[in-house]
Every structure is written in C-alpha cells, then in structure tokens.
Amino acid sequence: MNAGAKLARGHYLWFLHVDSGFGPELVTALQQALRLHSRALLFCRLRFMNDGPGAMRFNEWGVALRANLLGIPFGDQGFCLERQRFWELGGYCEQALYGEDHLLLWRARRSGLSPRLCPAPLLTSARKYRQVGWGRLTWRYQWLWLRQALPQLWLLLLGR
C-alpha cells in the first residue's frame, strides 16, 4: 500500500481492498464527505457481499458499532485521507504481522486526526467467512483487534 501511495499523484489517497465493490453513489458521497471533512480520515459504511454466510449481518452490525461508537474503523471500510497527512503519519507499518490499517488509525487518532463516516456503503467479500467458518473467523478477528487495540488505547490515554 505504501508503494502505491508513493506512485499516487492526487491530493487524497483512497485505500481499497482488492475484493471491494462500489458504485457511483459511493464516489459522490465520498466527494461530499471530503468537502465537509477534508482533514479527516474518512471511512465508509461496510456492507458484505452475498458470497458468505447469512450471519454476516451480525458482523455488519458489529463493524458499525465499533466504527461509529468507538471510532475504530478498519481498512476494509476504505480509508481515505490527504496524501500528505498519510505520510506525516508514517504510512502503513510494513513490519506489522497484521492490522497495519488498525495501527494507522491509532496513529491518526493520537495525532488528532478524526475518523469520519462516509455514509454510503462499500461492499466487501465475505467468502473467507464461508471458507473458514463464520464463528471461527469472527472470533479470531475479534481477538486480534482487541490484542492490538489495548496497547494502542493505553498510548492514546498517555498522550503518546
């Protein structure tokens, strides 16, 4: 992602997963959100494609709760921010074994950059949940993000 960001020439960077899907309404909503919150880290409302188990609606609810209430969206929600600000934050941590998007978010929050919702849905594939198992993968992801979040929360509380 850092390599792609180095090649980008626009004022903003929009990071999408390869299995993301969207239509023109999301592009319009993102442009409007950028006009309102040009200095924020924008993220989209996540919607899972119909290629996974039916229980993915619970995951959508959980993602919305984590992102909107706690202010902790993840990269599959399509982070969008100013290119210069991305580099000021240090880009994505290339040494992280997982959760480089999560770590970028925490650095953004510690620097005063607020995450803001772009209300249009961004689609992402749920096939991995079908392949691995909904419960197994959901609990694994919850464990990983909490394991990574707690030290980051401590740094935020300490003002570092």
Image: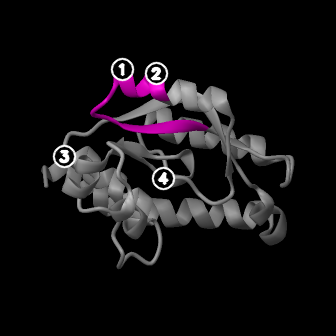
Instruction: Give the left or right position of residue 41, taking residue 90 as reference.
Output: right
Q: Nearer the viewer, residue 76 or 86?
A: 86
Is the residue marked by circle 4 packed among few (<14), some (14-19), or many (20+) residues within 10 Å? Answer: some
**Label 4 secondary element:** loop
Q: What amino acid does circle 3 point to?
A: Ser
Give above or below for 156 relative to 133.
above
User: CA–CA distance between discs 1 and 4?
Assistant: 19 Å
Q: Nearer the viewer, residue 42 or 31?
A: 31
Residue name at image x 29 percent, y 58 percent: 152
Give the number of the disc on residue 15. 4
Q: Earlier in the sequence, mark 2 or mark 4?
A: 4
Q: Earlier in the sequence, mark 3 or mark 4?
A: 4
Camera-near label (1 vs 3) is 1
Q: Which stretch did the figure color magenta?
A: 31-45
Q: Give yes or no for residue 152 being in the magenta stretch.
A: no
**Label 2 secondary element:** helix
Residue name at image x 51 percent, y 66 percent: 144
Q: What amino acid does circle 4 point to?
A: Phe
Give the number of the disc on residue 36. 1
